[in-house]
Image (tube, rainbow, N blue to C red):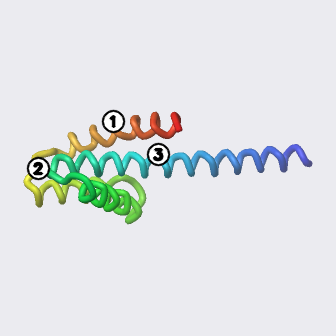
Amino acid sequence: MTNISDREKAFEDKYQHDEELRFKTEARRNKLLGLWAADLMGLTGDAAEEYAKTVIKADLIEPGDEDVKQKVLKDFQSRNVDKSVHQLERQMAELMEEAKKQLMSE
């Protein structure tokens, strides 16, 4: 009986670790995305950092990436930045890989 309990605990711990890592990776990706978008919109320094924080917060609105995409695309439109949904999605995918690399190297 102890073996089953130990296995369940190990599975729960792994699941918790994986979810925590996924959350951290997505948050890092969103920060990188926010900094990338800020640069395209001409924001620098503290303004760029603050914008990146708003992108991170946007991901907490609903599950998935749609809320982040909509926020950034809306901001691009208001600043006349010409980027398509496809270009944004491609950038998000690239930045997800970068975020993973960064977290693994810490």
* Residue 98 vertical placement versus 71 (above, below): above
Q: Earlier in the sequence, mark 3 or mark 2?
A: 3
Name the residue nearer the viewer: 98 or 11: 98
Say whether disc 1 or disc 3 marks the residue closer to the N-terminus: 3
Q: Do residues under tags 2 and 1 come within 8 Å of each other at their CB atoms?
A: no
Most distant residue in the front direction: 45
- Name of the residue lying farthest toward the bottom: 61
Residue at 15% across, 54% down: 76
| Amino acid, disc 3 | Thr
Image quadrant where residue 49 sits: bottom left
In x, y percent, where is residue 33? 30, 47
Query: Residue furthest toward the right?
Result: 1
Q: Nearer the viewer, residue 37 or 11?
A: 37
Earlier in the chain: of badge 2 and badge 1, it is 2
- The percent position of residue 44, horizontal first and vertical second, equals 21, 52
Rounded to the nearest whole Å, what is the CA distance between mark 2 and mark 1?
Answer: 19 Å
Which kind of residue does numbered mark 1 sit on?
A: Glu
Q: Secondary structure at mark 3?
A: helix
- Asked which quadrant contains residue 62, the reply is bottom left
Residues marked 1 and 3 touching at CB (< 8 Å)? no
- In the rendered image, residue 14, in percent from the top left (x then y), is placed at 67, 45
Q: Is residue 98 left or right of residue 47?
A: right
Q: How many marks?
A: 3
Against 97, residue 64 (above or below) is below
Q: Quick one: SS at disc 2?
A: loop
**Rendered image: mark on residue 81:** 2
Q: Which mark is residue 94?
A: 1
Looking at the rendered structure, the secondary structure element under dot 1 is: helix
Q: Which residue is mark 3?
A: 25
Q: Residue at x 49, y 51 (%)?
A: 23
